[in-house]
Amino acid sequence: MLKVLSTACAILLGAVAGAQAQSFPSKPITIVVPTSPGGPPDTLARLLSEPMRASLGQPIVVENATGAGGTMGVARVARAAPDGYTVSIGHFNSHVISSVTYNVPYDPLKDFEPVAMLVSAPMVFIARQGLPAQDLRELVGWLKSNPDKASFGSVGVGGPARVWGAHFQQSTGVGFQFVPYRGAVLIVQDMLAGHIDLGCMEGSNVVPHLQSGKIRIHAVLSKTRWSAAPDAPTIEETGVPGLQMTFWHGLWAPKGTPGDVVAKLNAAVVSALADPAVRVRLADLGQEVAPREQQTPGALAAHHKAEIEKWSPIIKATGIKTQ
């Protein structure tokens, strides 16, 4: 008798879950952005919200939840009900670097359902124009001759720029002083004013200033040149191999979100990324839309896992760990 009741309950629960998935969405969906307003993930979430609303038939609410290298916002989504109504837009920092450098209350791979890969932009290594170096080779020489005199702005104390900067120091034998900032915009502002010497950040942060004549891109941290700054060499071309770092964005739901719900969210994202107006705006921001075959949940899961496996030993080697 108990076996019959258990089977009946399982069938009933399955039917209820199926009905919920079929009716999804029946209320607004919240995209949690783990960074402050105005940054790349916030801009991306707001850009996608309208075409996603048109596809899903429900409002898309964008909420910023900042702190601890993006992990506060990610943790909020990890704790959310697995019903598809609270999702996380995240990126290379929040879902890879910070998950290693911070003591997080979740597993970045096991506690989320991947929805879709979104866009990517290369990290760029920049310097104020006034430094006496025309290219990276000259800059490395100057830094070796002036150890620890230059300042390097990085967002937070354990983010991608801090990791890359420490890796760059180890690879080239140079030294400089790290200066933590609350956001990349502040680093750019101080560099334009001549208050900070070096920096490393997602390329879209510097697109509006490429023609200012006050910031020099010494290297694009990708395997190929960047469409927004085609004259800037890749890090490989400068003679410092192995230091590529691409800043990518994805969308995740809490672990246990029904597959049909994930599929509907994915379809809405894919449709939004195919919108010509959205693609033009993303190109203007220096963001490259992920190829269609990489916009699947499986592709995001594989890429996410590969990135954590790549950067975890590098972070361990640099000794970077926040409390």
Image: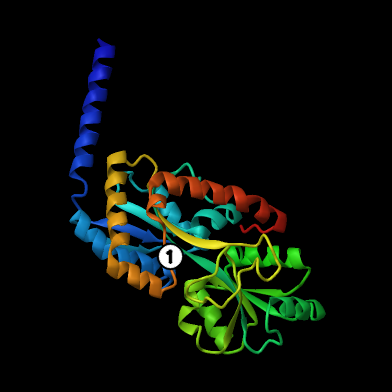
280 on left or right of 23: right
232 on left or right of 268: right
Amino acid type of the residue tagged 1 in the rendering: Glu
Vertical placement of residue 188 versus 273, above or below: below
| Residue 190, image x, y percentages | 56, 84
Q: Residues within 10 Å of mark 1 (few under 14, many from 20)?
A: some
The colour scheme applied to this rendered structure is rainbow
| Residue 158, image x, y percentages | 60, 62
| Residue 68, image x, y percentages | 52, 61
How many marks on residues? 1
User: Is residue 293 at all visible to an observer of this figure?
Assistant: yes
User: Is residue 105 at all visible to an observer of this figure?
Assistant: no
In the rendered image, which quarter contains the C terminus? Answer: bottom right
167 on left or right of 20: right
Query: Residue 20's quadrant in the figure?
Result: top left
Which residue has dot 1 on it?
Answer: 288
Q: What kind of element bears circle 1?
A: strand
Vertical placement of residue 310 versus 64, above or below: above
Query: At 34% from the left edge and 72% from the top edge, which residue is drawn?
Result: 281
Query: At 74% from the left edge and 64% from the top edge, which residue is drawn?
Result: 171
| Residue 145, image x, y percentages | 81, 80
In the rendered image, which quarter contains the N terminus? Answer: top left
Of the pair 154 and 206, the residue shown nearer to us:
206
Residue most extreme to the right: 145
Query: At 39% from the left edge and 50% from the top edge, which residue is drawn?
Result: 293
Query: At 50% from the left edge and 78% from the top edge, which residue is drawn?
Result: 206
Of the pair 70 and 218, the residue shown nearer to us:
218
